[in-house]
Image (cartoon, rainbow, N blue to C red):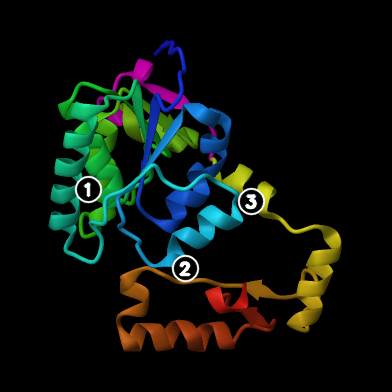
Amino acid sequence: MTVQFTFTPKSICVVLGTRPEIVKLGHIIRLLGDAARVVHTGQHYDPGLSETFFREMELPAPDLFLEVGGTTRGHQIGEGVKALDDYFSQSPPLAVVVQGDTNAVAAGAIAANARSIFLCHVEGGLRSHDRAMPEEHNRVITDHLSDLSCAPTQTAVDNLLREGIPADRIALTGNTVIEAVLGLLPAPDAREQILNKFELTAGKYALSTFHRPENVDDPGRFATILRELGSLPVPVLLPSIRDR
């Protein structure tokens, strides 16, 4: 799909709501410059999951914060759609950009579609094929509403094609997390300080995170994960916000 926009200030609305979205959309927001208009739905509303990342990634504060977090999935999506629909009716952007599979993504996609606003889905085409995951429904809905799905891999492209999405609505783009990683890597001296702080040797440790509810909400499963990590022949580093 060939689409041309004349980017004017605040003409491209980037809708996000969680920490991963801030990280993965940060480079795009910087590239858009003054054309970017950022709306944060508030799905992740704790400062450690929101403000901290805007500050450390040197991104402008959101233009609008909707405060729909802390409720059920249906409420977050419903309230997000209503608030965004009102906002878009008053100040329609040229395009809406969403990323991933969150409730904020679903709300942004539905609201953009309802107002016939061009919708771009970054990280389109990813599939777990697990209907028990709310995220799977969010990403499928968003891809089928999108005017352009930016797929990070050829597998993601193939997923979209199998679902009947026309090829001219798909672009193989790579993954924005690569730019995020490269932009956030500390300098060599700082890396050495981190290794020394935790008494680690480069290339001889593991870094582990776990955040999915099915991993951390079940005590037995969580204990199994910790036990297996503890059995590894290398030290395992578990980062937290307090380590920042």
Indicate which disc residue 108 carries. Answer: none
Indicate which disc residue 48 carries. Answer: 2
Report the residue marked by disc 3.
181
Q: Which is closer to the viewer, label 3 or label 1?
A: 3
Report the residue marked by disc 1.
137
Earlier sequence position, callout 3 versus callout 1 = 1
Q: Quadrant of the C terminus?
A: bottom right
**Other residues around mark 3 within 10 Å, as few (<14) / some (14–19) / many (≥20):** few
Q: Which is closer to the viewer, label 1 or label 2?
A: 2
Three-letter code for the amino acid on which mark 3 is drawn: Val
Boundaries of the magenta span: 162-175
Residue drawn at the location 13% of the way across and 55% of the way down: 74
Left or right: residue 171 versus residue 233 is: left
Does the stretch in magenta take in 219? no
**Residue 153 percent location from the top left of the image:** 49, 36
Q: Secondary structure at mark 3?
A: helix
Residue drawn at the location 35% of the way across and 61% of the way down: 44
- CA–CA distance in space, label 3 to label 1: 27 Å
Left or right: residue 171 versus residue 87 is: right
Q: Which is closer to the viewer, label 2 or label 3?
A: 2
